[in-house]
Amino acid sequence: MSKRDLLLEIGIEEMPARFINKAIRELGQKIEDWFRENKIAFHEVNLFSTPRRLAVLVKEVAEFQNDTEEEIKGPAKKILFDKEGNWSKAAIGFTKSNGLSVDDLYFKEIKGVEYAHANKFIKGEETINLLPQLGNLIASLHFPNSMRWGSQNVRFVRPIRWLIALFGNETVSIEIAGVKASNITHGHRFLGEVIPLIAPVDYERVLLGQYVLADYEERKEAIVEQIKRLEEEQNWGIPVDEDLLEEVTNLVEYPTVFFGAFNQEFLNLPEEVLITSMKSHQRYFPVKNKNGDLLPYFVAVRNGDHRHIETVAKGNEKVLRARLSDADFFYQEDQKVPIEQNLIKLESIIYHEKIGTLAEKVNRIRKITGEIGGILSLTDQELKVADRAAEICKFDLVSNMVNEFPELQGVMGEKYALLQGEFPGVAKAIYEHYKPRHAEDSVPSTTIGSIVSMADKLDSIVSSFAIGLIPTGSQDPYALRRQAAGVIQILFEKEWSISLSDLLKTVIVIEKGNDNDELYQQLKAFFKLRIQHLLEEKGIRYDLIEAVLAGEFNSVKEIVDRAETLHASKEQVAFKGIIESLSRVLNIAAKAELGIEINPELFENEYEEKLYEQWKQLEAIFESKIASKDLFEAISELEPAISAYFDHTMVMADQEEIKQNRLAQMRKLAELIGNYASVNVIVVK
């Protein structure tokens, strides 16, 4: 079977760099899935992307779909024959509509009824006739932000300016938003030309001649190689941030690396300010010497060749000089404002119209900080440091520098606090209380920083839930999931024995002024999901996760320990018998009435007495707070006594008093077992 290459290119106005990688992966996957669903053979799919184009090259596409044969089901046998035993109109109609004859029919029994079946051969259609369907596929691409333009109804990330749909040397009939596909592509916006393609295989070569490096990875590697060359030539160290490198790669079609300089006096600014000005605002790479000290230079990537590169460098120097001058002014002005004056400003800034001002939020953070500090038995001096850190943790939000560079919140707070004579532990906590900022970030290194971080995050979560701002589906505008994950991460990594249940109830009282069980249950479910994700990342099986999360909602460390203990025990020979025995107790205990206490005088055999004694011993072990592994061993040792109990004792006795006493014994035992884990949901084989 002959084969051809297929090229699809969507030419658009420059799209945001952050959308490109996801968009081209989605397009490639959709096209690959389409070919498989339509049973069209191909060799491989190559992806290309730049700010002005998304392109897919499918190699060695078959010119016809694969021929298929499928079994089709027809009417029941009883209606396929008339009274004389001849084929009925229904039989003839069924076969005719499927291009078959009655001789092709055979019968298969389904649930006691015989139905006609036949094997239908379907010849593959010519690929060129199916390819126009790809137009709908392209139009279905999803972007975080889409737009309409002109009188078009199609929504896309940016206006579509040209389309290529080339199957071999034949143009596929596709039209999107009034743009018809052709074999014409466009080179670099300023350096290239409009040029026809003879064949899909020429795509990369032709574009390279028009100053477009279409392969993302090749562009990225070209930037890295040029940076390395510059490092060697200048004896510099140029730290390459991966996120910035990805963004820059998606901002250019033909990358040329160059460097510029700025006034050495700007090195008096904090390094974070300089780097943020360069990276976040100008997309420049900072330059350091071999000792890691910042130098008055920057490295940038031009979308073009080396012509007039000196002029380009001077223009970038001018822009950076203006930005750094602003930063220097902000830095000097901020130092003139006392911290207490900034705290007063927080009183006029609304955090949320239904929650209150930033100053009110800070007051709640202080109260929560004090509660956590008390739980952790901090010294009076530590409590004083923690309270001051909580009191001024947000003061830098009203500074000029953070207003210009929001990503420096906390960073400038630490620096300004030190400049105004605050205790180093307080200053450090101001910076650390924002950590972890994302899933890959580390937790605060200090105890005070960790406490204030938790207090801030818990306040945001509980106050939002209290007014109904609860994340749903993909909607989480206040990043409450991330903040809850941060609380869980801190509690786990610090190994603090803080009951999550008690902590949430304490914060609810601070937020609401009283207990609120409905709010507590919502928060409990929310935090359980975050712990579930933590356990999933550790490779814990789903049923074991469900079991421990249904148990006592205490410290994160203890919950994780219980899950890991069960996970480590599940392959042991005795595990099945232990879980089945414990599960039997939990299942029958569900029939017990509340409020009935165990009366040992009603015991009728030694097995009830022995199980009762072991229950009392286990209760004491629970109260001793031993390690999770040892606790599970203690629970496991109940198995012989439980088995003997059920072998010799009828729980549902005829005498009501005896029955209720035995059910009460099961309930008390089940409460202890259930506090560890709801073992009756564990799957054992």
Image (cartoon, rainbow, N blue to C red):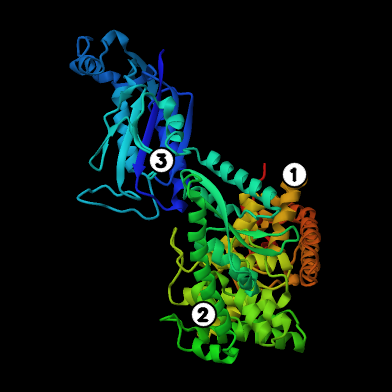
| Amino acid marked by disc 3 | Leu
Query: How far apart are labels 1 and 2 at the CA level?
Result: 60 Å
Circle 1 crowding by C-alpha within 10 Å: few under 14, some 14–19, many from 20 = few
Classify residue 477 by image quadrant. bottom left
Residue 52 locus on image (x, y percent)? 39, 45
Q: Which residue is painted at 38% across and 18% down in the image?
A: 68
Secondary structure type for disc 3: strand
Mark 3 vs 2: CB contact within 8 A: no
Query: How far apart are labels 1 and 3 at the CA level?
Result: 50 Å
Query: How far apart are labels 3 and 2 at the CA level?
Result: 41 Å
Determine whether 266 is above or below 636 in the image. below
Q: Which residue is painted at 38% across and 49% down in the image?
A: 14
Residue 234 locus on image (x, y percent)? 68, 52
Q: Which residue is mark 3?
A: 54
| Amino acid marked by disc 2 | Asn
Image quadrant in which the N terminus is located = top left
Q: Which residue is mark 2?
A: 400
Classify residue 71 by image quadrant. top left
**Residue 423 or residue 95, whichever sits in front:** 423
Secondary structure type for disc 2: helix
Residue 373 locus on image (x, y percent)? 70, 82
Residue 192 locus on image (x, y percent)? 39, 39
Residue 584: mark: none
